[in-house]
Amino acid sequence: MKRFLVALGLVAAVLFLGLPLLGLLFRAPWSSMSTLLGSKELATSLRLSLVTSLSATVLAVVLGLPLAWALVRMRNGILRRGLLGLALLPMVLPPVVGGVALLLAFGRRGILGRLLDTWFGVSLAFTTAGAVMAATFVALPFFVLAAQSGLRAVDPRYIEAGRVLGVSGAANFARVTLAMARPALSAGVVVAWARALGEFGATVTFAGSLPGRTRTLPLAVYLALDSRPEAAIALSIVLLAVSVAVLALLRDRWLASPLAPQSTPLS
C-alpha cells in the first residue's frame, strides 16, 4: 500500500509538472515560428529583454558581491541575520509589492525619486532604467545566496597562504577567494540573469509596459495572449528554451546525485 501511494504521488507530480510543458510544446506554431519571432514588435521586446536582463545581472553582481562578502565576514550574529533577511526579502516578496515599493522610493513622488527629479531632472519610473532596476531588485537575492555559499566554502588556509607569500589584500581576494568561489559565483550569475529575464510583476508596476522602452518579453507574452495567442506561445517557447539552457548550464550544481563523490581541496 505504501509503495502504491508513493508511486501514485510520483505520477501525479510528474503529470502536474510535465503536462503544462507538453501542452505548450504541442500547441506551439512550429511552422510559423520564424515569422512570429521575426516580427519587429517581438524582436524589439526580445532585444529589450536582453538589454535589461544583462544590465540587471551586472548590477546584481556589483551590488551583491560586497553584500555576500560582508555576510560571510560579519561576526555579529544578530546584525548578520538582519542583513541576510533584508538581502533575501525580494526573493519571497510578491513581485508586484516590490514594484510598488520601488515606485514609492524612486518614483517622481517617491522618497528619493522626488529629489532626483527636482535636483537633476531624472525620472526612473516608466523608463528602461526603471525596468533594469525592477529586474535587479528581484534578481539580486539569487546572486547573493549563491555568492555567499561559494565564499563561505573557501578554505581560509589558502587565503592565509596567499598572505604569507606576500600577496596584497585586494590581489589575494581576487586571485584566491574569487577564483575558488568561481563555480558558485558563475551559478549565481546565471540564475540571476534567468530571474531578471523572466521578471514581470515588479517591471509592469514600476516601469509599465511601454513599447520599445519597458515592454520586455514576459510583458509581451501577457499582452499577446488575447489578441495574438500564437505569438504568445512562440515567445513562451523562447523563455522555456532559456530555462532549459539554464538547467543545462547548472546541471553539475543542481542535478548532480547527492551520492556522487565530491572533490576535496588539496592539502
Image (cartoon, helix red, strand yellow):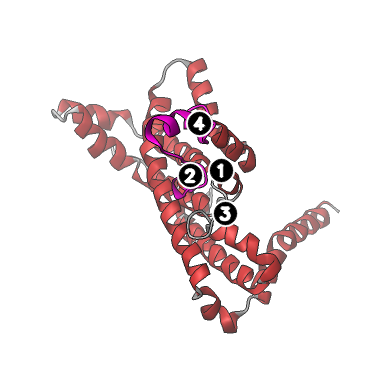
Query: Which residue is more in the foreground, 178 or 85?
Result: 85
- The N terminus lies in which quarter of the figure? bottom right
Marks 2 and 4, the one that precedes in the sequence: 4
Region of the chain picked out in magenta, as a range: 105-131
- The residue at which mark 2 appears reads as 130
Badge nearest the viewer, 3 or 4: 3
- The residue at which mark 4 appears reads as 87
SS category of the residue bearing label 1: helix
Counting other residues with Cα less than 10 Å from the Cα at mark 3, is it few (<14), some (14-19), or many (20 or more)? many
Q: Is residue 232 left or right of residue 178?
A: right
Residue found at x 47% / y 40%: 140
Mark pair 2, 4: CA separation: 20 Å
Counting other residues with Cα less than 10 Å from the Cα at mark 1, is it few (<14), some (14-19), or many (20 or more)? many
Marks 1 and 2, the one that precedes in the sequence: 2
Mark pair 1, 4: CA separation: 20 Å
Q: Is residue 205 left or right of residue 116?
A: right
Q: Is residue 14 above or below residue 174?
A: below
**Residue type for callout 1:** Phe
